[in-house]
Image (spheres, grey):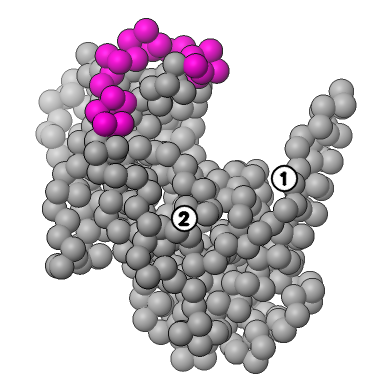
Amino acid sequence: MKGPIQVIKSGKIEGVQDLGPIHEWSEGSADFIIEQVSYKGAPGAMAVYYNPPVHQVGNPALGAYLEGLDKVYARKRDLRFLVLSGANDPVHAGGDLKESLEKLDRTLAMIKEKEKSNASPAEIDQLYDWADNRLKKGTALHGSIRKIAQHLRVVAVCGGGTRFGGSAEIPLMADYLVGDSRSGMCFSEAMIGLIPGWAGVARAVVKAGPLNARYMALTGKEVKADKLKAAGIYNVVVDVSIPFPKMQKTGDPKGDKAAYAQALEKHDEETGLCLLPRGLDLAICPAEEIPRVKQPAQLVSESEIAREVERRENPQNYAHLWGKPLKEAGEEINRLGRPLAPQSVDALLKLFAGFERDSFDEAAFVRKEMEADGRLYRDSRLRAGLMATLEQKVADYREAS
């Protein structure tokens, strides 16, 4: 096994005793390991996901997460904490958009065949089971972590750079978060044609309040570590001054790639040795010593969100840019912001319209979030968003003909 699990097994973290695996899974370059540990005499577990280079969470990994967390729950009487961690690389992506596009294209082709044979709407709808099943696994992961949290303290360590989509949603499922000072979170789904479907909106509401959750979900803007702490999402931010490795171009692509991989491994270990002790300290300290913000800072005002969303959700505002590479349209995109998918905005506004602070039911909200995201997979404009994102071009979100 490679990746950050080696830091835990290395004996370099003072106070950690490695007690062996609770769960091990690997497929290709991806690993998910849950290791039983003792930290300063307190028994616990550390769950580590690794899938270079951008750590997308695929369907097999979701299955591995669920199976492993079931094993942790079965041992809840013997453990005091669970720490969720992973690699400390510059980018942590959400889903595999290329895979989603391939599945969507196959689905659209099958729909045409089904329509020729006068298939029922229900038969056609079943062709989207691939999307529904992934969403169900993501929300089941939320349920599993929250169930464990009733018995253990659950901490997530967010090392490295920006976390997009599902890579942000999974740590948000924890009780407490430790953030790398270089890190950030970005709910980029509304710029693709989806919404966070794995409880990301619900958990942002719980931790940062509805206004900050609206800002993150509706605008798709990255929120950096200092603001994540001010908003109540991060409990601790660790100052990490280590620069991210960069791919060198020496004229030897194979050698450059190998050197970059080696540099990432070294960076991962150095960063892990900075962050993991803080995560473990947070996992065992008295509850009254856990850093918290008494009143989450409001990242922006309601009117600022409304103005920005109104500008960016109108496809006609981008008519002169449709299909242009983002780099070529850079000046205009900096002024306007990247286009938002109107269907995503509509889904999010409806989701928030049903929010009542005094009667907020997290599990019920998560189900609504999942169902809303599922409907967006069926929207004809999703393909335009996937293509534009993969090709790094300006999306055209007019109704598909």
Q: Where's residue 275, x and y in %?
A: 66, 65
Residue highlighted by disc 1: 244
Position of 99 relative to 209 (above/below)? above
Tell me where residue 305 sits by quadrant: top left
Position of 287 relative to 145 (above/below)? below
Position of 369 relative to 69 (above/below)? above
Give the mark nearer the N terminus: 2 vs 1.
Answer: 2
Local crowd at mark 2 within 10 Å, few (<14), some, or many (≥20)?
many
Q: Where's residue 179, x and y in %?
A: 56, 60
Residue 146's tag is none
Q: Residue furthest top?
A: 320
Residue 194 visible (yes or no): no
Along the viewing direction, whichever of 129 and 309 lies nearer the viewer: 309
Bounds of the magenta segment: 307-331
Residue at disc 2, secondary structure: helix
Residue highlighted by disc 2: 228
Query: Which residue occupies 39% across, 38% down?
Result: 220
Local crowd at mark 1 within 10 Å, few (<14), some, or many (≥20)?
some
